[in-house]
Amino acid sequence: MLEARQLSKTYTSDGVDYEALKAVDLSIGDGDCLAIVGKSGSGKSTLMHLLACLDVPNGGNVLIDGRDTSTFSEKAKNTLRNEKFGFVFQQFFLNGRDTVFENVVLPLKIRGASAADIETNASAALAAVGLADKKQKKAKDLSGGEKQRVCIARALVGDPQVIFADEPTGNLDSTTGAAVEKMLFDLNRDRGITLVIVTHDDDLARRCDRVVEMKDGRIVAEHLTEATAR
Amino acid sequence: MKTWDLIRTANRNLFRNKLRTFLTVMAIFVGSFTLTMTNGLGDGMRDYVESQVKNIEGDRAVLVRKKIERPNGGGRTEDTQEYKESSGNEGELDFDPNSILMTQPQIDAAVRDIDGIKSVTPRYNIQGEYISLEGGKKYNLELGMLSDGLIAKTEAGSNVKNDGEIAIPIGLARTLDPEIGRLVGKTAVIGYKIPDGSIKTMPLKIAGVLTKGFMTNTNSFVGAETARLIRIDQRTEQGADKFIGFTIQMESTDAAKIGQLKNKLDTKGFEADTVADTQKRTYDAIGIFKTGMNLFAMVALLAASFGIINTLVIAVLERTKEIGLQKALGMGRGKIFAIFSLESVLIGFWGALLGALGGIAAGLITNKVLLSVYAESFEGFSLFAFKPLSIAVIMLLVCGIAFVAGVMPAIRASRLNPIESLTYE
């Protein structure tokens, strides 16, 4: 379970303070499927970064399974992100010259997993996103949709509890975007992986169970969707 | 991340930009090549000098000379001396030659209270004229005395041990008989001039044929007693009991006693050296030469290390997003630092390896060429000598320099903020 308590973040650039997040409270349960929506600059990405321990808040706390992450060492946070979280970014961040396999296994390599575990998990993750046959292809030779599926496989390979997806369909056309969305929702439904999607796409948000709407660094609305009722 | 994965990642990163990596490696190559050559040159010279001086040994012998007292107060000075009409003839030495001579009683007095001395013998200055074997042709003879306690290495036979023996250089030996082994034990006749201008002869048994060296290339040697007899024939009245040097032979190689002896002699106005001291001075001179040459090579390496810094700084910028992703996925600072440091060390390693191989190849080729051109005068001499230990030290040094060069870029990479890096344009 992920919890934000009075979370604030202020960026300073050229001596001017900019409050990106103002005392935000949010609770995300295990297996939740949550969308954080808002215009650009609303603080939705900042909130995700803080929840994922990619950044340090100026005020408030992030709790993971009841433990305050502000007490964690740098190393403990690295381990937490590596073992408990998976990430899917709008820009993919794949290494085009490396093979699909090498891109997918990066989290396991960082973890220092054994060669056998790496092989097994990578095959399973690639099969889950339907790219088992593209394993040895160079990442740069893939289509946009395939690239994002590789990213999902990379997020999945370490067997995470939470997947953070930042505009996962932002760079995709509607058809391939829909396929990627379905894949993420399936992971949430079938494997109980908590899904936190940051998006400004209302259609995508509506398909999540819960939507948190942000504006000027605050949560202005929070509601369950029709998808929940279904 | 496992160490092996770190190395593989670093290596793969280097191959991503082959041209840039190649050029940086080439800069290191030049430095490593130069260092291998300069070091090989120093080692080659040392080997040569060692082969030339090591054939005279004597770890129980101390060679004594008188300290040179210069009339202007001693020591070399850059002050120009005023010309004095009365100061003597042109071309005269700036010290009295008699001032370097000494007598047996002087030495005996100086070392009287030191124990462990086996013998104190003067170094007799003798001149030979010719040598001939069994009534054959006469050959020029350069004659010297081998002091008690000194051992000259031989190719055949043995060092002069007894009265009436002579050891001859290998060149002379080959002229007398190509099969030098046959000469040992034969009796040769030597001729030497005496003060009235006539030539006196003396039969001597050939004890051995000397190994080549600076002192033994042309000189034949007799022992102290034989030298004394020749000296008696050759001496003039003036300065008959004065000598340019003495050799003190100790009963043992006890370094403390030798040190005590040297100190004592020093306070009495004498210079005392063992053979090892003399050799050490030569080696030190070569060592200084080698260090000087190596410094030039180090300048090349210093320049190349800036190439590494440049390459890595650019790589950090190029790979900012990748570093951001790695950090987001949980890679720690230490591992990021390690990857960049390894890249740096790998550049250094390849440059060092290629440079060392290139340097060795160039040195060996030069040796061959020199040998074919100057074989006569430099028998057994290699201009360049390459020792595995030296090469290993050079390679470690270059890798070390490369590591240091990589520290700054690697720290920059390790300190990148993941969020800023992921959004870096």
Image (cartoon, coloured by chain):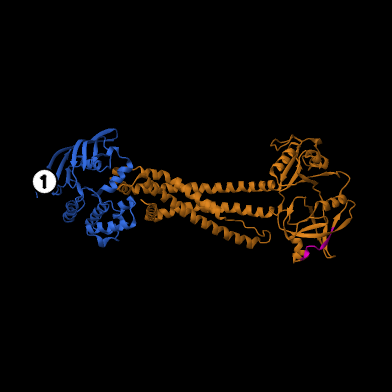
Q: Which chain is blue?
A: A
Residue B316 in view (yes/no): yes
Q: Split into 4 quadrants, where in the image is the N terminus of chain A?
A: top left
Image position of B344 with respect to B362: above or below: above
Left or right: where A105 falls relative to B189:
left
Image position of B367 with respect to A77: above or below: below
Element at label 1: loop
Q: Relative to the observer, which residue lies in front, A75 or B127?
A: A75
**Residue on which disc 1 sits:** A225
Please state the extent of the stretch shown in magenta in the rendering.
B182-190
Residue B245, percent from left and from top: 78, 45
Is residue B183 covered in magenta? yes
Image position of A197 with respect to B75: above or below: below
For label 1, the crowd category at 10 Å Cα-Cα, with few meaning under 14, some 14 to 19 and many 20 or more, is some
Residue B405, percent from left and from top: 44, 46
Q: Relative to the observer, which residue lies in front, A94 or B294?
A: A94
The chain carrying label 1 is A
Residue shown at 40% from the left, 45% from the top: B409
Residue B21, percent from left and from top: 41, 53
Q: Relative to the observer, which residue lies in front, A95 or B31?
A: A95
Residue B357, percent from left and from top: 51, 58
Is residue A118 covered in magenta? no
Left or right: where A137 falls relative to A213:
right
Q: What residue type is labelled 1?
A: Thr
Residue shown at 30% from the left, 54% from the top: A105
According to the rendering, which colour does chain B have?
A: orange
